[in-house]
Each structure stands twice: as structure tokens, then as C-alpha cells.
Image: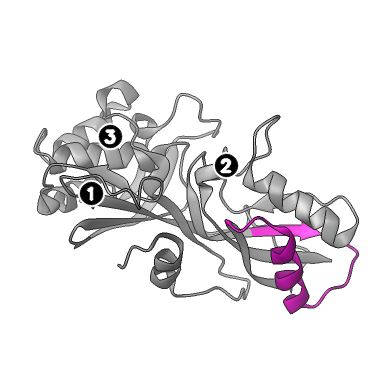
Amino acid sequence: MRIALGLSYKGSAYNGWQIQPNVPTVQECLESSLHQFLNEEVATVCAGRTDAGVHALCQVVHLDTLKERTNNAWVKGLNALLPPDIRVSWACRVSDDFHARFSAKSRKYLYVLRNHGVRSPFHINTAGTVFKPLDINAMMKSSKFLLGEHDFSAFRSSQCQAKSPIRIVHDISIRHSNPYVFITFHANAFLHHMIRNIVGALVDIGLNRFEPEWIKEVLESGNRSASSATFSPAGLYMIAATYDEFNLPFSSDSWNLLYELTGIKA
């Protein structure tokens, strides 16, 4: 049978989601705990692979097993075996045609910026930092140029393995709650480092290094070197994957989850 899990994790101690040799990853920790819990080898698939240092408020994972467990047993049993910075929020049985990655219609991410002249010792790994005041209105204006279907090569890592650079960005919203700036991204999918590269450009515009229209020029150039530096992974959170045809028990309160994870009150 196929089981779906909802995971939240603080990614600071991990070299991203995907299993890699000789480094700790979220997938390796989860599959190791599943092996202990089920006494069998289990492979997992996630909705969106997060990079080193990136967090998740709701990562969706699926796995196949012959072992019967109640939904509550999945949650409590796995959490007893997982490290404290990885939690299973919910579990449920799904149909065999559910696929955490390919069934997802869209993904949502949140970037948390702390805009303050002094770095906070409490948010070194949970928020990006900008020391000079940001022009939020300029950032909002520039973000509108990225909406819709575009070739996002200018915001794509050179290591990106996606077959196509075309993505559809449904929404980018920017919310200011001093000293924090919350940037929410909603798209069908994202390229490697795409969000962090866009955040770098938005920050440069917010610091008045470029006019808001500059981001449109960068987008149309298709040239990664024309854009800003890749921003820190510390403030990036996967907050949702959407599935039109499957009824999953999502937690709808991402802001409270953010507060639990970071102490940042949105």
C-alpha cells in the first residue's frame, strides 16, 4: 500500500533532502527511521527536493510498504525514531496512483528576511539578513514582472538538472512585519536555486541598486551572470505542495508552524 507523510524539518544540520554519500540528509534520516519502524528497506519520494540548509513546514513524501499501521502509529512511531529537528506531522493511506512529486500541481515556498542593522543571534540559520533598510514597494513592483510563464534561465543554477527552464509563477507576495519581510512564492515548480536567485535580485532592488524594471531585463536576457548573487538558504521554507485530486490532511496554519520552528512571529 502507498502511504503519504507530511514532514516539517529544520534543514540547518542537513545537506538537503536527497541522499548523498558521507553527509547527513533529511531523506537518509527518514529512510533510516522507516527501516527501524517497519523492519524493511523503504524508498521515499518527496514533492520538492530542498537544498542544504533549507527548511520545510510541509514537505509531502510517499512510500510503499506491506506493513499495516494506523495513521496515529505512523506519526508517533516515526517521531520516536527521528531526530528532533525532523517531525512527521500527519500520515495517511493514499491510492496507488498518488505520487508526491508528479501528482503535485504546484509548490509554495516562503523566504524570511530579517531587515535590521544588527544580526540576530537567534535567527542565524532560520532567516536571511539585510542590514540596510529595504524599499518594500520597489520589491513588490519588480516581483510582478516575474508572474506567468517564462524561461527562468537567468535565475537557474548552473547545476540545475531540469529538462526545461520554463516555469509558471502563479503569485509572489511580499509582506512586511518589522523587522521581518516575508516573501511567498507559488509556482507549478521551481528550478534549482531559482527562489534564492530571485530573492537576491529583489533585495538588490530593495536596496535601490537597480530600478524595479531591471528584473524584467534580467529575466528576458536568460543570462544567469546578469542577475544578482544567490541568497542565503537560511530563510527559505517549503510550505506546501498542492494536489487537486487527493485529499491529504494538510495543516493550514503555516504561520504557527513557522513560529514553532523559528520563534519568528509573522
SS state under label 1: helix
Report if residue 106 is visible in the image.
yes
The residue furthest top is: 225
Task: Answer above or below: position of 254 versus 103.
Answer: below
- The number of numbered badges drawn on the structure is 3
Residue type for callout 2: Tyr
The residue furthest front is: 121
Residue type for callout 1: Ser
> What residue is shown with label 3?
219
Residue 14 badge? 2
Horizontal side of 196 relative to 178 (left or right) equals right
Which quadrant of the structure image shows residue 193? top left
Callout 1 crowding tier (Cα within 10 Å): few <14, some 14–19, many ≥20: many
> What residue is shown with label 1?
143
- The quarter of the rendered structure image containing the N terminus is bottom right
The residue sitting at 33% across, 63% down in the picture is 264
What is the spatial separation of the Cα atoms under label 3 and label 2, in whole angstroms? 31 Å
Circle 1 or circle 3, nearest the eye? 1
Among numbered discs 1 and 3, the one appearing first in the sequence = 1
Q: Which residues are magenta?
A: 61-85
Residue type for callout 3: Leu
